[in-house]
Amino acid sequence: MGSPARLTACVGILLGLLVAGAAAQTPPEAAAARRLESLRDRPGALYAFLRSMPKGGDLHNHLSGAVYAESYLRWALEDGLCLQEYVLMRPPCAPAPGGTHPALTDALASDPNLGNRLIDAWSTRNWTHSGRSGHDQFFVTFGRFAEVAGRRAADSLAEVSTRAAQENVSYLELLVTPDGGASRQLGRRLGWQDDLDALHAALLAYRPGPQDTPRSLDQELHNASERLDQMEAAARGQLRCDRPDADPGCAVGVRYLFQIARASAPEQVFAQMVAAFELARRDPRVVGLNLVQPEDSALALRDFDLHMRMLAYLRGIYPQARLSLHAGELAPGLVPPEALRSHIRDSLLVAGAERIGHGVDIWQEDDPEGLFRLLAQRGVLLEACLSSNDLILGVSGKHHPLRGYLSRGVPVALATDDAGVARSEHTREFQRAVEEQGLDYRQLKTLARNSLEYAFLEGASLWEDAANWRSVLVCQNAEPDGVPPPSCLAFLQGSARALAQWDLEARFAGFEAALH
């Protein structure tokens, strides 16, 4: 899944479709815009319209958090896992009632209401009854289902790919830990030293004894690529991708971002960063990296400047690596005022981020108007996660800065963040954008196009002028009922990005024609 060959396979269905150009609104697009406006105050019908609407890519999607708790419960039962309070544990299990971690199946048999409580504990469903804030309930879930999530990566990939296809999402960048945490163990073994040159060299040079773990960084990265191979092969098998009755999820393009656990000791964070940059250099499926875990955690706040310095140093060594950063996932009252003043700017200017995830506290940053201008001038995309921001930070509606970004020319795409934990989906992000932010059809279409224009896909863009969505010259003469010229077809086959964008335009053409 997620290979250039998979995207190339889309060419056949795109023949004869016109790449939408420019600023003038076509009659079919106008019909779609009118249809959305007629549904603005009809939530159910609006949802159905938006679910059918092409959405491009989801660029901010944590794989383990994208899975619904019901799936984790089913898989945990199949795997014979144990339960200690709400935390899944590996066997052997201690028999109930005396044991502290009985088999999950026994625990469910003895308590008819436990299944529902587990779904609540592994997600933010009914979080207002949890005794925690939305923030705390959100982040506590991951440790509870971690045991089954680690075992069921292929099942998770299959689930999120199927759901993406059902929602007309055609591309995913999934946040994963492909080395299984081995690089963090290596960092712990070597320890911290503030000389980044020396620490980088030590990580690359490390050679373990015959019985030691982790293995060398080179071996662990080889293992990481093998894990991705196995995960993708198993997911393709589940989705029947080589059969005539293939699941639509097989056609969803997938790439990966290596996630760095920022709430860890400095030597572990740096080791993970090195592993991520190295794996992105070696494995084309790993297209970049990102920092994860709560930005407001004590270690993440203490070491924020250090993390920016680490990234700046490593980007000098690995200039081809792509970087999207969680930054500004903060709100007044959550942290002291001084912690709100520079995270977005430093992520951009020090670390060199090409995309910003969340960016909620921009109005609390020093010189926010200047920062808006800087983001717009540099073409740094905002990954807007409306449901997540409401749940974790309590920021929504007029308090959310989305319209501030849009009105100042900052490119934006909508993303789910953790749809399973948040009990959301990509369609609901679009619905929030309409109902809470007042966006219209053309703005939503721009956000969908942005998701592929700023994706970390390989290859040239379809768009010669993305401001007006005018295609490259070789594809400008394609006719709606004809075959793309050979030069256009060759261009598409040589660029995974352009091919994904062409596919999105084909989807928009079909969607809008049906409404015209």
Image (cartoon, rainbow, N blue to C red):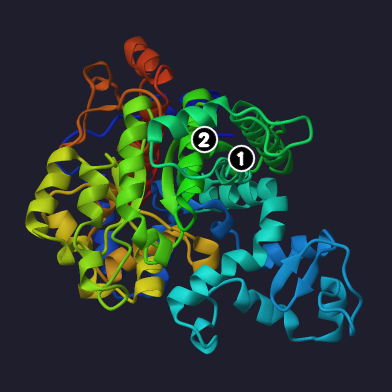
Q: Position of residue 493 (x, y in %)?
A: 43, 18
Q: Where does the image place residue 419, in percent across and percent down from the top left?
A: 50, 62
Q: Is residue 180 left or right of residue 396?
A: right
x, y percent for residue 283 = 53, 26
Which of the 4 quarters of the picture holds residue 109? bottom right
Earlier along the polypeptide chain: callout 2 or callout 1? 1
- In this picture, is 215 found above or below 383? above
Q: Which residue does the image show at 72% across and 79% down from the upper left? A: 85
Residue at the location (22% across, 47% down)?
411
**To which quarter of the image does residue 478 belong?**
top left
**What residue would you read off at disc 2?**
275
Q: Do the residues under discs 2 and 1 have CB atoms within 8 angstroms?
A: yes
The three-letter code of the residue at mark 2 reads Ala
Identify the residue at image location x=56%, y=53%.
Answer: 163
State the residue position of label 1. 179
Disc 2 from disc 1: Cα separation:
8 Å
Q: Nearer the viewer, residue 200 or 13?
A: 200
For residue 434, side relative to residue 124 (left or right): left
Give the image location of residue 111, x and y in percent. 81, 86
